[in-house]
Every structure is written in C-alpha cells, then in structure tokens.
Amino acid sequence: MKIRQIKLLLISLLLIGLHSCSNEETLDSENDPIVSGQLDVSKQSEVHQGLFEYARLMSLAIQKHDNMNELLQTETLRLERRGYYEQEFFVGMQGESEMKGFSGKSLNQILATVDDAKSEVNIKEFLNINPGMSVLLAGDISTDVFSNRVYVDNNFDDQDSMEVVHYYENGIMYTEPLFVERYKKSFVVRTSEVYMGVKTSPLSKVEEKSASVLFTYDDGRSVIVNAGFIETPNSKLYDDDDIYDPGSGPYEGPDDPLIDDGNTNPGNPGGGGNPCTATCERDCVNGTENLWRLRTTNDYDHQFLGGKGEWFFIIIWANDANYTIQNGTVVTTGSPLSYLRTGEIKVKDDNSWHTPNFSSIIWNPNESPTNPNPDGDRMKVICFESDGGSARNFQSTLSFKVFGANLSIPINFTINNGDDFIGEYIVDYCQDISYNGFIYHPAAVVDIQHNER
C-alpha cells in the first residue's frame, strides 16, 4: 500500500514538473526555443527541402554578417516600393543582383559560401524545382529589432494556433507553437502566395488579364504571378536605382485600386428610374450579378508569419442543364451546376471596404423559349483565404428550385491544400439588389455586398 502511494506521489510530482516546464517554454519561447529532432528534412518534398535549406543558409549568413538583417530587409521592400503587394523578394531574382557591401556578390552567391556544402548547386536545383521560392519580411517595419530567426512556411495551418512552426537560428533548426507572440522582425522562406507558375513563351491576350511576368530566368523561364498584385509596369519593378532606405522615413506607396475611397456609389446599378413593381428586384434591374465590395477585421492570414491576406471566391449556380418533369419528379440531364472562381483579392483587416467588382452571370431563373435552361433561384458563394500548396478537391452542395421542385446537387472544384475556408452564404434571387445592394455575412467579422451592374 505504501509503495503504491509513493508511486502515485512520484507521478504527481512528475506531471507538475512537466506542466511547469511547458508553461515556461510558452511564456519565454523567445529565449528558450525547443530544438526539433522530429523532422527529417530529407523526407520532405523536394519543394519543401529547398525552403528549409535556403532558410538554414540565410540564418548562417545572419550569424556571420552583422548587417545582414538590414540588407535582407532592403531586398524585401524593393518590389513593394514599386507597386508589388507584399514585403518579399523572389530567390530567383537574387542570382545576379549585386548586394550592397559585398564586393559585387549577389545574395545567392553570399549564401553559397556560408558553409562547406555545395550550396550554390543546391540553390540552383531548388529553383529549378520551385521557381516561385520567396522570402517574406515578417513583422512591423517600424520595429528596430530583429530576432535573427528564419522561419519556414511548409504549408503549416495558419488557422490552428497549436500548429508547430519551424525556424533556423545560427544554422540550427528549432520549433515553437504558432500561438507564441512574436515582437521582433524576422524572415519567412516560402513559396510566394501569388506565384502562378512559369512560361517559356509570351503571355496571350487572355492570360494578360489575370497574370503578369515578374521576372525571367537565364534559361528562358518566366515567373508568372497574379496580375492584381502588381500596380506598376514590370520594367520598373526591379530597377537598381532608388532602393528603399529604412532610414529615409516612412514610404507612401501608390494608391491601392482595390481600397474604396469613401465614395460608396457603385455606379447606380439599379438605374435610379421608376420604382420597381415586380415581386423580385432583380427582375427590374436585369443586370449582371456583381460581387461588389467586402470588408473584414480578420484577413485569415497569420498576422506575423503569413504576410498579407489574399482571398478568392467560388460562385456556384444552376446552369447548362435540361430539366424535365417525369412522373412528377424533376429529372436533370447535362451538368446541373456551374461555378466561377474570382481572382485573388488583396484584403486588409482594418474594416475598410475593398471593391473587387467581380461580375459573374446575368441571372435568369425563369424558363422561357429564349431561356430553356433556367439558372435556379439560389446561388452559393464560398470564400477562401489563399495559402498555396498542392491541389486538393473540395465538394459543396447547392439547393435550389427549378419548376417549383427542390433540388440539392453536389459539385466538386479544386483548391490548394493550404487554402483556408472562411465561410459561405446563399444569394436568393428575390433578395434586394438595387442601388444599395444586399449585404451577406459568411463569417462574423466579414461583410460582403452584392449588387447588379
């Protein structure tokens, strides 16, 4: 009996000790990081191997050169100064550009000599596999202090506060939970969230509407990014003159065309004429369904390690199908649902209005000789925060009426495995849609307003 009591006492003391250590690590993780022995980089995908290795080399360069943090910060701000949306640089752009203070060497050349490994060869191999590798400046630019850490974004779930994140300091890998508060600036090696792939031929007229060439490798591969995230001509994006100087005061960038200037007039989508007498306002407006504007107090990207929020929407409706009534039941032939995906939309979490003005379809749920395939009386809109990664399937279901009968039909579409689901909402054909539109709430902190135009 006494032996059993002693064992219970020892177990209790051990649990108390472990709890105490856990609290200390949580409260003081800046000074007491956890060494990770659980992740074998060689077993990661080739893309992620490149991210980890580049982060390791950057951490060694920061240790070796006193001014490396400041120089890296300058590189991350060069593109933003010229109209790029984010504080990041692409690793592929660092192969030939001279880095200030290193006798004509580029950043990649500097990193190739910080250890005894064949780092230059490794960097070239990793860029062949992942041309969209980039480095993000994490933290407030007005903060003077750096942490000397280089984090790795290997598609960790930035909506899970308990997620483990990896970083290098002095060439050694550590881990910490995502919920830890970070006050010092640092860097994150990742695949850029607006990277769309590479091309070896010029963009077509259709492609130019959604994509832009950011830069081109010596072998002819052009890196393509989302066009909505570049606000200046490409030729001016990476000029060597007028490099951002952190000591020159705050930079006032160009106006953001997606931020509303306070004028909430959407262009009189309802026409402003005689009052509508139809049962549904959309029958009077008769315009194109338009995702007019949105605002939020949460951009759903991790505030420190994730950079700025990029959202996109999937709009689903009934279309391109033939409906017949057989024995009192609606029978569908053809594809019962269609969907559109918006481009990525820059989102700030300051509750200011963003105006993507994404027009989808001229919505007609009524069968007629000129409209034999009605669109149904409802559409669904699903909102995601874009985080990149490999492709995965996502299934949703839309319930709607055709010929007075209720139908519920699933549809599959493809997103990236890092994309975060924000919320969804149903747009009913008979909801108000005239001048002021109609506001929806896919999440408690998100307002989205539709109109017609």
Image (cartoon, rainbow, N blue to C red):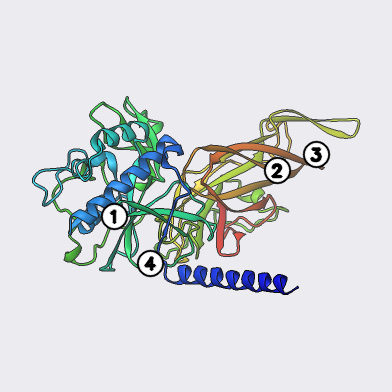
Q: Secondary structure at mark 3?
A: loop
Q: Mark 1 against mark 2, which lies toward the viewer?
A: 1
Residue drawn at point x = 65 percent, y = 57 percent: 432
Q: Is residue 25 above or below residue 422?
A: below
Q: Which disc number belongs to residue 170? A: 1
Q: Which disc number belongs to residue 363? A: none
Residue drawn at point x = 11 percent, y = 52 percent: 101
Percent from the top left, x then y, of residue 295?
50, 61
Percent from the top left, x then y, of residue 322?
74, 29
Quarter of the figure with the N terminus: bottom right
Which kind of residue does numbered mark 1 sit on? Asn
Q: Which badge, 1 or 4, comes first in the chain's sequence?
A: 4
User: Quarter of the image holding residue 438?
Assistant: bottom right
Q: CA distance from mark 3 to mark 4?
A: 63 Å
Instruction: Left or right? Give the position of 276 relative to 121.
Output: right
Residue 40 vs residue 393, the one in the foreground: 40
Residue drawn at point x = 21 percent, y = 59 percent: 70
Q: CA distance from mark 3 to mark 1?
A: 68 Å
Residue lying at the far right in this picture: please name it: 327
Check disc 2 and report the residue beneath it: 397
